[in-house]
Amino acid sequence: MSDHPIADHGLIGDLQTAALIAVDGTLDWFCAPRFDSPSVFGALLDPDRGGRFAIRPATDDYTAKQLYLPDTAVLVTRFMTAGGVGEVVDFMPIDGDEKRHRLVRLVRCVRGEMAFSIEVSPRFDYARESFETRMADDGVLFEGPRSALTVRLIREPTDRRTEARVDAEGDIHAELRLSAGEVRGALLETGVTGPLEAVRVSEALRLFDQTVDFWESWLGRCTYTGRWREMVNRSAITLKLMTYAPTGALIAAPTAALPEQIGGERNWDYRYTWVRDASFSVYSLLSLGFSDEAWALAAWLRDRVDEQTEKNGGGPLQIMYRVDGSSDLSEEILPHWSGYRGSAPVRIGNGAAGQLQLDIYGEAMDSIYVAGRNGLAPGHQGWLAIRDLLDWVAANWSQPEEGIWETRGGRQDFTYGRLMCWVALDRGLRMAAEHGRPAPLETWRRERDAIYTEVMTRGWSPERQAFRQHYGTEVLDSSLLRMPTVGFITPADPRWVSTLKAMEKELVTDSLVYRYDPAASPDGLQGSEGTFSLCTFAYVSALAAAGELDRARLTFEKMLTYANHLGLFSEEIGLTGEQLGNFPQAFTHLALIDAAVTLDRELDRHPRAAARRHTAMPAR
């Protein structure tokens, strides 16, 4: 069994990789040198064989609390015991080095005295690479054939030698005793083998100040001043932590194989950049004033379009890529790892990368269109690549596909895929008209209108009085909550009003929203799943756009209660309120931002509704 629930973690990072640290001070997930690199510590997925770096009180009788230093990604884990109060302050300095990555763990006694127990047990390459341990007075080196990790002590020259031992596995065990006001700790470095020299406390504090300054300065660019500023700011910082700075790519999550159902097989690797997620990010970042990040993502998307044109003359995009833009995401299973709480198999890589998912073209084109209206219009070569891509969409939109949810039960005519192909062609037509660019306008317009007609006929279920998941089923799908958002249908259209009511009856449970019903629409996988947090926030946006402001606000506020103690969300929420799936998930935090911005806008437009008492609240 895993020692820590998924939600009992905080995230730190340096914009190239990230680490998860549990509420008891255990670092149990860290990959280097990139998000999608093999793990150094992986106890999150196997507490016995995964490896960890734990710092906690030497006694079992303690209370732990965790918080972020305000407006930063500096994580503070506090321990209260009968003899004193202590803290572990974790952060990763941001210096742009792509090979060497540093993680600082400051240990501080705030009051009284405290003895800290320390364990360092790396397991390189998902515990598949052996290593040797070399210990010195001021640190330790763990070195394997392909990997290296140094741990340098943060101490003063006059300190007594830290007592430590190496066990049979090559792991380090030590104890650190501090009195009130004392600060010591450790600095981890990947990709280097030395020197094993101590780090002065003043140098560690300088790195702390630099890191705090970076995050406060970055967040100071945020233009959001609405009702949910604290949650929106935390979501923005979380998205920044999941951004690979060298390319601007945004990963879906920094973890792999965290289950959508405890004990189930829906355990995927999310450490890659989905075209869909990157596209949504452009809107969210622009809505908060982070234009540089939005432009970097839009440029990353355009690069993928350009590459596909160069390779295949405008053929289909891959649905996801590595952070550097490469496309090899071969999926494999780690049979020697037990999985989170026994949820096997543990998968790395992602076999869905080669699926056909037609919706990504609409999402990509919508984001490129929005970026263009905000000063990042494509140049001549970029437009030629877009034109080739849209020619492919015009010729191929009617194909069956795997769909947005990456089902593994065979291709279908998914309504959402058709919807987003309509968006792709519609945005292409708008760009051509607004910028005077050459394009086969009649072909694009004819195919766009054909898609509209098909969705309104075959995508509509007369029996359910709602738009359906795909043409061969009566099942509903919450991805279609975006229909009015993208301009395909108005929020007041009787068909949309009826669809929203049908979704509320079938997919919504106490404000939480399921993607679809796997039992009614088999997706090729065993087991069930929790409610999908992204869909709940999309439901909020749909309610707000439909003028249901009281319900939208209450649903939003309810959803915020499912965040963890730091304001972070995983992919799904289980029946008992437990966070499930990879953590934290970018898509969820993007949807939170969009819901907050949309709800703020609608409440400001209708001040009477904003001031009105929630009708859904119980009477006193």
Image: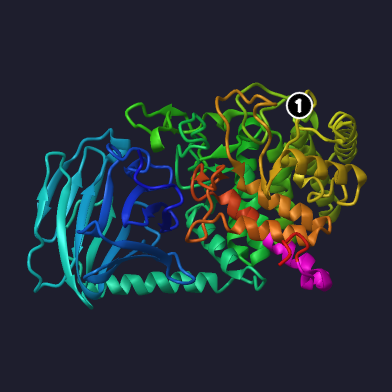
Q: Is residue 190 left or right of residue 608?
A: left
Instruction: Classify 260 as above or below 561.
Output: above
Front position in the image: 308 or 60: 60
Residue 296 appears in the picture as rendered: yes
Front position in the image: 382 or 337: 337
Q: Main secondary structure of the magenta part?
A: helix
Instruction: Classify 418 as above or below 210.
Output: above
Image quadrant where residue 333 sits: top left
Mark 1, other Cα within 10 Å: few <14 / some 14–19 / many ≥20: many
Residue at left 64%, top 72%?
Answer: 223
The magenta segment? 594-613
Q: Amino acid at mark 1?
A: Asp
Q: Considering the numbered disc 1 on the image, is that residue within a helix, a strand or a loop? A: loop
Front position in the image: 15 or 164: 164
Residue 196 appears in the picture as rendered: no
Residue at left 28%, top 66%?
Answer: 106
Front position in the image: 248 or 257: 257
- Most extreme residue toward the front is 620
Q: Is residue 522 left or right of residue 182?
A: right
- Most extreme residue toward the bottom is 181
Image quadrant where residue 509 sits: top right
Residue 620 in the magenta stretch? The answer is no
Residue 274 appears at what percent x and percent y? 58, 42
Image quadrant where residue 416 sits: top right
